[in-house]
Each structure stands twice: as C-alpha cells, then as structure tokens.
Amino acid sequence: MVARKTLLGQKIRRLRQDRGLTQQQMAGELGISASYLNLIEHDERPVTVSLLLKLGERFDVDLNALTDDAERQLAAALSEVFADAGLRDSGIDSDEIARLVGAAPRAARAIADLYRALRAARDDAQAVNIDLSEGRTRRVVLPTEEARDFFETRRNHFPTLETAAEALRPAAGDLGRFLGDRLAQRHGVTLEIAPVEAMAGAFRRFDPRSRRLSLSEALPLASRNFHLAYQLGLLEARDAIGEIIRTAKLSAPESEMLCRIGLANYFAGAILMPYAALLAAAQSERYDIERLMNRFGVSFEQAAHRLSMLNRPGAAGIPFFFARADIAGNISKRFSAAGFHFSRYGGACPRFVVHEAFATPGLIRRQIARLPDGATFFCVARTVEKPGGGFHAPSGHMAVVLGCDIARAAEIVYADGLDLTRPEAATEIGVGCRLCERADCRQRAFPPLQHRLVVDEVVKGPSAYVFRPQR
C-alpha cells in the first residue's frame, strides 16, 4: 500500500526545508539513504505507509498535511476562480493550477482568498446600488463562508471543548435529567416545555433576565437533550469558546456569532456522544449510523454530523465529509473533509446522491462517486425530518450525506455487497455544472464557464449544451 504520489515530493521537500535540514540529515532520521530521499522529493519514488508513519513520528507532523486532500480542495477552489468571467481568457488549465498549488500553496491560497474578498466586495457594491435606488443603504457581508472556513481549517476538531465535555458528562443515568438539573442548580436556569403557539415559531428561547429556557413541545426527545446541552455549552464553555474565537481573528461580528453558535453545538454533540465512547462504538458497529443514534439517544443527523468530528490526532476515526441539503439542492450545512470539494458559488451536482435521497424518504441511499480529477468517494445519504408542530405547520424534510475516500469504504457497513474495485460502479459527478467538463452529462443544467458554447440546430446530443475548449 502506497500513499498518493501526486505532489507529495514537493511537500516533503518543504517539510525538510522548513526544519532547516539537509537531505542527509532527514534521511538519517528516517533510516533511508539520501539518494532515495532525493528521488522521493522529485516524485520519482512513491512514499510507503511505513515511511509516512516515520515522518509523522520523527517530525511531529500531522499526516493529513502530507496527503493531497488539502491540495485537491485548493485546486478545486482555484478552478472556480479561473472560471470567473473576468479570468476565462487567461487560458489557465487544470495542469497549471495543480503545479501552482504544489509549488506555491501559500500563494495559491492567497489567490483563492483574494477572489473570495472580490466576490464579497462585488456583492456589497451590488446591494448598495440596489438600496440606494430606494433611498436606503445596506452593507452585505458573507459571514457564512468565513464560518465554514473556520471549522474546515481546524478539521472540525476542538480539543479544549472535547475535554470540557468529557469532564462534565455523567458516567451513567438519565442524561436529559442531568442536563436540566445542572442548568437549574449551577446556573439558576428554569426549564419549561412550552406549547407551539407560545413559542411563536421558535424551537428554543432563552431569556437571560429571568433565566428561563423554553423549549417547544414539537421537539423530539433527542432534540430536547441537544438544546439543553447547547445551552449548557453557552454557559459552562463560554471562556473556552471565547478564546477559540478570539484567536481566530474573524472579520465580522456576524462571523463570530455564527462560530460561537457552531462551537456551542459542537460542545453539545460532545456531551451527548463522548469522543472515546463514540469512536469505539463506531468502529465496533462499522459506522452504522442507526445503531449509533439508538445507543446514544440522538437523531440520525446528529450522529452523522458527530462522526465527521472524530479527528483527534492519534485517535482518529474515518475522515468523513458531511453535508445537509434541502429538496431544491441548497446546502445549508457542510464540512468538506476527506478531500471532497463543495462549490462555493453554485449548487451541487444533480447526480450527487444527496438529491436521490428524497426519492426514498427515510431509507439509506448509497453511491460510489467519482470527481473529474479521479478522486473517488463512498457516500451514504438519507432524508431527515424537521419538526413542524401541527397540521398547519407540517414537518420539513432535508437530506444529509456522509462520505469518505473509497479506500476506507470497506470499513463501513453500508458498503457491504458492493464491488468497490469495479470502475463502472462509480457515478461520475462534478463539483457543479458551471465547473464540470463532462460533455456527456444528461443532467447538465448550465454550460461550463471555462468553455465556449457550441450551438448546432441539426445535431442533438445527450447534453443540452455542447461546448469546446477555449483557445
């Protein structure tokens, strides 16, 4: 078994140079010859798993930093940048993007960040112009993207919150009663389960003055416990959450608030599903989400999302990506681990399994998905029901998807019975229609930005759009 070879040599060379080592010195630490290390740095020899483990042990480096998942996501982000209408004529193709990411990752990241700032400024200007015509002004910011980047760059793992949650959770007993009692005894919080009408559309409301926490009776038990744990996180993990946000140096108050909410949700998940216990159960049950939700008394979405957080160095689970979408394909929650890239500026691929889940509500859908760069993932998706509150407020349906690199699929119960090695078993998907170059897709909704549209009145192919590369 060998690691992916792409750009790995350049990473090892940067690692050596950052530590001020010669090839002879690093080779001595790894127990290999300097000439062999030289071949590795020039991508003329593959890196074995045992050598990767030595690199991690001897140089105290996260092995995730030595794999190409981050580079693949950065390359995908740059593909969106250079597909912009203002840059399409630059002629920069995927090979050049890959070379840029490999040789100068900081510069590549700066380009992606600069483009995101440009998009935000463009949206701001457009909003101001629209509002000025009505005699008003309003500033538009994109805190959601900054908050998503905040969690992704930290691999959705926060050790201080894990530690605080582990210290708080009781060893046994009724967890819901414990949470309610602790809120009352430690923080003077009174809990009430209120009628739907009294909540005026809200599921949770906390009044800091009266110290009253109101939860809607429409919430199922698992959700009630989660909201209790969330409120406890805001109170007991306040300093830890504040320190994490302070060091993040976020650009807008809205971004800070979104991250604060996200971290309180993270803390709640850690209380309901303690790290070590969940990891042991997940490995024992082969990541059977339904068994995990029953064991820990949580919802399907809560269990699936928590599985994407098992990224503790030295005790990590399978690296998963996670997303939640509505029936129109709008992604409201996402975490792009495992090298899977979600489009920032458009919808998800219509062939992605998350859309198929709505055809069979409540049932698991499976998919082997291959992206245009050859990266292949195993994905499972299922609809989840959001509480409504009555006949005139029906429940809503969303779909969640959990996925990992195909190399780890055999460890998951949902892959049983599938031939994971058969190339034709994979569904060819893209990041989104505007960036996808697949010419034979029958579900293409838009032509790709980086190619010239060809209109032919006498020929009809499988796709509604025919295109040719720009020259």
Image (cartoon, rainbow, N blue to C red):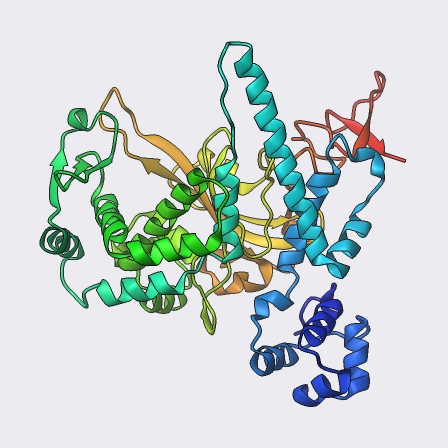
The residue positioned 73% from the left and 34% from the top of the image is 84
Residue 291 appears in view: no
Rendered-image quadrant of the C terminus: top right
Work out whether 143 lies above or below 394: below
Side (left or right) of 111 relative to 251 = right
Side (left or right) of 4 relative to 229 = right
When asked about the image quadrant of residue 406, the answer is bottom right
When asked about the image quadrant of residue 458, the answer is top right
**Image coordinates for residue 266, horizontal then vertical, percent:** 36, 53
**Image coordinates for residue 269, horizontal then vertical, percent:** 32, 54
Rendered-image quadrant of the N terminus: bottom right
What is the number of callouts on the image? 0
**Image coordinates for residue 277, horizontal then vertical, percent:** 31, 67
Residue 17 appears in view: yes
The residue positioned 80% from the left and 28% from the top of the image is 466
Work out whether 254 lies above or below 150: above
* Depth order, front residue of 209/455: 209
* Depth order, front residue of 399/120: 120
When asked about the image quadrant of residue 463, the answer is top right
The residue positioned 40% from the left and 51% from the top of the image is 305
* Depth order, front residue of 302/83: 83
**Image coordinates for residue 248, horizontal then vertical, percent:** 47, 53
Work out whether 314 lies above or below 180: below
